Image (cartoon, rainbow, N blue to C red):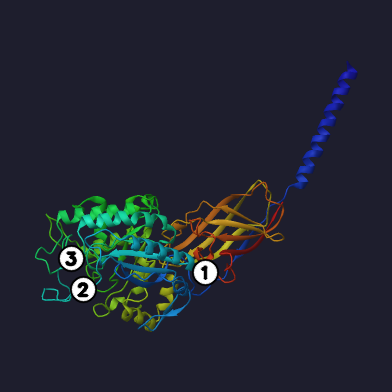
Amino acid sequence: MIKILTGYCLGLMLAFTLLSSSCKDKEANLVKVEKVNVTYTESAEDFPNPERGFYRYSEVHSSNYEVLSASELKGYRSLQAIQSANYSVLSTLVFRYYILDDVVNQPIKSTFLDNLKKDFAAAREAGVKLIPRFVYTATAKPGNCPEGFICPLYGDAPKNIILDHIAQLKPVLHDNADVIACVQLGFIGVWGEQYYSDFFGDASQNASQGKLLDANWRDRIEVIKAMLDAVPADRMVQLRYPQLKQRYIYGVNALITSAALTEGQAFNESDIARLGYHNDCFLASSNDFGTYEDYGNSSTPRASDGSVLNTLKDYFKADSKFVVVGGETCSDGYSPTNDCEPGGQAQAEFSSLHYSFINAHYNTDVNNDWQDGGCMDNIKRNLGYRFVLQSASLPDNVVRNSAMTITLNINNKGYASPYNKRTVKLVLRNKATKEVRSIDLTTDIRKWYSGLNQITESVNIPADLPAGDYEMLLNLPDAYASIATKPEFSIRLANNDVWEATTGYNNLNHTIKVN
């Protein structure tokens, strides 16, 4: 019995010794993870980035269609002089008026739809995106009427025709969502600005009513609803006036004090999250030529006093943080506020209203003032997003099949955050073999708002990743697989010695050892 116990104890001692030895071996193989703070240098360069900046203007008539040229569009990505302007711009966006001048009372022709597809193909090849607006006329017909420079009949189409045309466009828009930045409502009124209209109510001095009636609002709401359906759910539709959105969301009796979009409602493809704005008279007058105006309804009068202006602009400021905003200037003679600071407030307005893009071609009198006033370079750089990577906390080493934590400190110096969804990827590139492994981060780049953003993520290192030294890179590609590997559609950080033009990656200038 004693011998058995002694043997048992010796066995326990041997097992303990082996276990202890095994633990020590494992402990010796453990890697102590060290973190390094990497700092980066800001770049002052103006460079092309997707879905932001000065857009190039284009128009085409359905009666005489000329397809966009991929080589010309590609040239827009480089600095080019603008006619009648004292400045040059580079662009990744092309605004395109599609003037349906020969189908006001009939279906859109198949040849037009085929040519529209070719336009999108040209944009895809060139590395740019389109901002389409479909209209029936973009010409003011002068005459003997109160407004003089523009008189009825204006030349737009009735609702039934518009709805049929939107239904025809739907398949093409859905098939080419990858190269659509956003779509402007269009259709109603001259220039598609929903103002001078033969069929949807005329709010101008040319009409005795001088306001919009309930039926006019309901008709407009029906067109907006059709456009939201025709445009892919992950793309936004821009409206000309903030009150249009209020009346669409809350009904024809909605007050100008109606609630703006909140972050909790944003970016979920709901109607309220998909309606943005194009202000085509940026700082042209105290209320931007009727942009901030209450157009009334059947039971309420039209109003445009200071209280209305301030209320609607405050609504616009709050709402615009989460939706796409762009447009153009339209007059240099009414308001000095459209100049550079300190005499004007152009940059402050762009910032508070979260502008992502503006027309490079109109009105060049206003835009020339920005060049002369010294703020044009800032506006070029800051329209939309501009991400400056200030520093990053990155590990020196990591074990496969384990998690590592990274922190990126990014200052968005732009007026807005990106309005379309895209993936944020951490890229590990083997220094010896050049093998690349991408890991999706959970952060939503649309929430990298203006100002400081700290992104901290726990990243799982794949168990099958070969051991070795890896470069760390950040890739911000387009969400669509059709263009996700094209560097032209990836976001570049505003830092020196970071951008890789051939891959579309941003090099974090740090090597990690994978064990």
Reading the image, the residue beneath label 2 is 140
Residue 261 seen in the current view: no
Disc 1 marks which amino acid?
A: Ala
Q: Residue at x 23, y 70 (%)?
A: 289
Disc 2 marks which amino acid?
A: Ala
Residue 125 seen in the current view: yes
Q: Residue at x 43, y 74 (%)?
A: 380
Closest to the observer, 125 or 324 = 125
**Labels 1 and 2: the sequence-earlier one:** 2
Which percent across, then down, holds residue 347? Answer: 37, 73
How many numbered circles does the render carry?
3
SS under mark 3: loop
Which percent across, then down, holds residue 290? Answer: 22, 67
- Give the numbered dot on residue 30: none
Q: What's the distance in space between the residues labelled 1 and 2, CA to CA?
A: 42 Å
Residue 255, image quadrant = bottom left
Q: Residue at x 46, y 59 (%)?
A: 448
Which percent across, then down, holds residue 381? Answer: 45, 72
- Give the numbered dot on residue 304: 3
Number of other residues with Cα within 10 Å of mark 3, as a class: few under 14, some 14 to 19, many 20 or more: some
Q: Does 92 sit left or right of 199 as displayed?
A: right
Q: Looking at the image, is mark 1 or mark 2 nearer the viewer?
A: 2
**Labels 3 and 1: the sequence-earlier one:** 3
Q: Is residue 284 above or below residue 38?
A: below
Reading the image, the residue beneath label 1 is 494
> Outermost residue, top direction?
1
SS under mark 1: loop
SS under mark 2: loop
